[in-house]
Each structure stands twice: as C-alpha cells, then as structure tokens.
Image: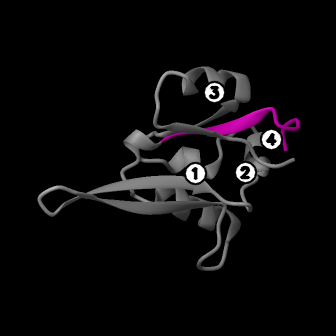
Amino acid sequence: MPEKCEYGLLIDYEYCTGCYACQVACAQEYKWPAGMGGIRVIEVEQKLPNDRAYLTYLPFPTELCILCAPRTRQGLEPACVKHCMASCMKYGKIEDLARELSKKPRMVLWVPRS
C-alpha cells in the first residue's frame, strides 16, 4: 500500500447516481462473496412535501477497503474510482483532495486505517 495515510478517496455525493458500479467493481476485483465488499452504496430516501420523495445515494467505504493497494502500487486507480460512471470519486494525495473538499459541501474525504 502507498505510504501510511498519504492517499485517500474523495467522494462527491452530489453527483452519485446510484449505479452501484463502484460496489460491483470492488466485489469483482476481490471476488468478495455476496454482501461483502470494500465499498457499499447506501440509498437514502427523504420525504418531501406533497408526498414526494428524494433519493440520495451515498457510496461509503467499509472496513474492508484498502484503496486497492495492489492496483495503486501499479499506478492504477482503485477499482471503484475507475468504474464510477458519474466520476464522483477521486483517488489521490490527501493534501490535494483536502483542497478540493473545501470547495463543496457534499463531499467527504476518506482515508483508510493504517
């Protein structure tokens, strides 16, 4: 894995479409059994006035996520980032991602446990 706590994953929740490509890519990369994986897409339904609903999708790394260390050592992106159809995930140095994080309110910076 890259140096300890040097790299992270920036997720822009505003643009996640709920395609689950990140979750599927992770499961296929590591051949996880059903229900396991390094990232999970959470669907949140918000009730709005006039019996309307608003869906939000939140891709969220799990305790199994290692940011695809075997891939990133080869200079490749993590599988979730590569396959994100909405391009709402970015892998990179924490300092660079933190600068982007300050630009928008619906983003999160995730750093794996070392």
Secondary element under disc 2, as helix, strand or loop, is: loop
Q: Residue 20: name its quadrant.
A: bottom left
How far apart in space, not on screen, are marks 1 and 4 (Cα)? 16 Å
How far apart in space, not on screen, are marks 3 and 4 (Cα)? 19 Å
Residue 84 in the figure: left or right of residue 77: left
How far apart in space, not on screen, are marks 2 and 1 (Cα)? 9 Å
Comparing 73 with 92, the one in front is 92
Residue 80, horizontal then vertical, whole percent: 58, 51
**Marks 2 and 4, the one that precedes in the sequence:** 2
First to last magenta residue range: 1-12
Q: Nearer the viewer, mark 2 or mark 4?
A: 2
Based on the picture, tell me whether residue 2 belongs to the magenta stretch. Answer: yes
**Marks 3 and 1, the one that precedes in the sequence:** 1
The image shows residue 85, relative to residue 94, as above or below, that is below
Residue 54 in the figure: left or right of residue 106: left
Q: Are marks 3 and 1 in contact (CB under 8 Å)?
A: no
| Mark 3 residue crowding within 10 angstroms, few (<14) / some (14–19) / many (20+) | many
Q: Which residue is mark 2?
A: 68
For badge 2, the amino acid type reads: Cys
Residue 57, horizontal then vertical, whole percent: 41, 55
Q: Nearer the viewer, mark 3 or mark 4?
A: 3
Q: Which residue is mark 3?
A: 97
For badge 3, the amino acid type reads: Leu
Q: Are marks 2 and 1 in contact (CB under 8 Å)?
A: yes
